[in-house]
Image (cartoon, grey):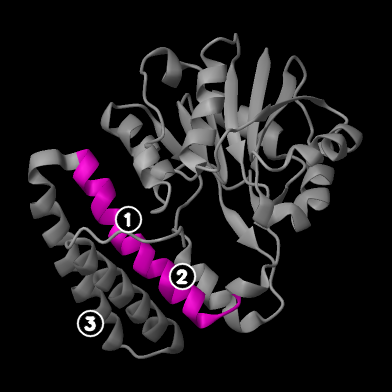
Amino acid sequence: MKVYICVLISKKNIKFLNTFLSSLNQLQVTNGYNLQFIFILESKLSNLKDLIKRSIKKKFIIISAHNNNIPNSRNIFLKFLRSQNYSYAGFLDDDCFVNSKWLSNMIKFIESKNCDIVGGPQKHELKDNYFKDFYEILEPKRIHGQSVRWVATNNCFFSQEILKRTSTLFDEDFSNYGGSDQLFFSNFSKKNFSVKWNTTSYVTEKYQVERENKLWFFKRNFRYGYSGNKIDNKIYGNISNVVILSKICLLFIFALVFLLFPTRKNILRSLFYMFRTYGRIIGLSNYKPKKYI
């Protein structure tokens, strides 16, 4: 049975590439399964083909993308899958290193839970423990086996069934917004596919100096706000304005409630909620960011 794992190789993460590729080589493959990696390279990175060929010990295919639009690159993989015979597929990010049991645990989980889509946690390398709370609050809080509405492409795995039964693709309108993965998997939830959380298959994001900065976290929460509006518009259609206004009110209430119990973590939670609220409000004016945050 064949398993395809897709990775988008980007210019901004070249510094992590050797570590990432080494971790892929350590992946344990369950008996009876044939693993193959699909590397989607940004148009200006063809010079990395030789490095990948030298580094990867498992089977792989390299596909060049003609633009650097992330949703478009993900769709290249989905279109590739539609012509293949496979059991499972998934996405990983190139700025991480992967737990050696990631694949075997994903296969075990998806078969034992009889679900269609599985997501897992992303941990973070830190230089300054001051930011540990920032990441803990930023990441969604989910328990093992929990049903969820969506997962992220930094760590996800899915059955062939989701593409057999739908023609869903990543929305390329989100190339500067972020959130195309949230919309993509939310659409499957809406169609009653089973989406669950597997804590045993984790990835670890490499240390990134620009992220150990308060402003980066506030900008990211601001982005979650305006991209959340765009996602809700796509999902809820005619009633999206009601949904968005309700969420703005809830986010603002959460921000105020956490201020009533002013511990360091709660103040941080309150600030994150306030920036998401602000992002939602700005998003009502059809705000268009110049680049992805």
Magenta stretch encompasses residue 108:
no
- For label 1, the SS is helix
Q: Which residues are magenta?
A: 212-235
63 versus 213 height, above or below = above
Is tag 3's residue or tag 1's residue first in the polypeptide sequence? 1
Q: Identify residue for label 1.
A: 227
- How packed is label 1: few (under 14 Cα within 10 Å), some, or many (20 or more)? many
Amino acid type at mark 3: Leu
- Residue at the image point whose x is 19% and y is 68% from the top: 281
Q: Which mark is residue 256?
A: 3
- 28 sits left or right of 74 in the view: right
Residue 137 is tagged as: 2
Residue 219 sits inside the magenta stretch: yes
Residue 155, horizontal then vertical, whole percent: 58, 43
Q: Position of residue 169 (x, y in %)?
A: 40, 28
Q: Residue at x 28, y 47 (%)?
A: 231
Q: Is residue 149 visible?
A: no
Q: Is the magenta region chiefly helix, strand or loop?
A: helix
